[in-house]
Image (spheres, rainbow, N blue to C red):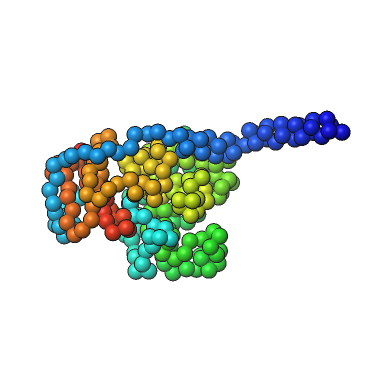
Amino acid sequence: MKKIITIFMAAVITVSAAWLALRPDVRFIATAAVESAFASEKLPEKTGITARKYTLDELSEREDVEFNDDLILVNTSHTLENTYIPTLVDYKETGILLTENFSEAFTKLNTETKNSCGEGLYFSSGYRSFAEQEQVYSEEGSDTAQLPGASEHMTGLAADVYVNGFAGKSIIKSPTGRYVNNNCCKFGFVIRYPFGKKSVTGISYEPWHLRYVGLPHSEIITKNGLTLEEYVDLFEYGEWYSYGEYVISRQQGDELFVPETFSECSISPDNCGGYFVTAHR
């Protein structure tokens, strides 16, 4: 009898393993988890640069400096006021409201996705106002919705996407969903709530939730298996860091240092009391 039970259990294990191996979403999650655990991409390194100090008012008047909220951290510990209203555009007149940076980058991502997979992405949700988030929270509860003020959807920098026939976690059952998860960082996006990081983000794996943070931040975050929370904490206030052709600094106060020479420069609040200055040399 013991021999029969042993044989039966071995058969069950073999069949289960074979079934799991045939599921592309399971293989994808397993591969992503291993890659994240052993990620070893080079992190930004401290560097010295020649910079000049400006007041925020002075910087806001410069045409060569862009102010945005691309690196704003939003979670239950870093919330948004009910008066927070981002500058938004209607994505291709679909009724989905997003920031202009998100909209432009998503157009490029979706074009590349269609060219590579033959099928693109659709939006299930984009920007939500504080009041709209209150309604979602009251209807869905804390298991699936964030408290008003703690949702990234209030920034216009986050959106939920799906593939025709594949929504929610099943998105990675489709080649398009897996392609987007693997390549969105090239266009300034991250999978905001990656697999195995609930202890950091407080939210389970959401392969359908795209967050725009811009380059080079999206590549650094993704290639090092980080969350936005972990990424923000990498930077000491007042220091400059080098990554490829970019320099990055996290600063505090009403006066910020900006490199004397750059081709592009953006400034974003971090929602932690400071700002990120990102310059492309």
Viewer-proximal residue among 119 and 214: 214
Q: Is residue 136 above or below residue 215?
A: below
**Is residue 106 shown to the viewer in this render?**
no
Q: Position of residue 54 (x, y in %)?
A: 14, 54
Residue visible at 33% across and 45% down in the picture: 234
Residue visible at 25% across and 50% down in the picture: 237
Residue visible at 22% across and 46% down in the picture: 239
Image quadrant occupied by the N terminus: top right
**Is residue 265 shown to the viewer in this render?**
yes
Image quadrant occupied by the C terminus: top left
Q: Position of residue 79 (x, y in %)?
A: 38, 62
What residue occupies the far right of the structure in this picture? 1
Residue 237 falls left or right of residue 207: left
Residue visible at 45% across and 46% down in the picture: 191
Viewer-proximal residue among 96 and 7: 7
Viewer-proximal residue among 167 and 95: 167
- Image quadrant where residue 46 sits: top left
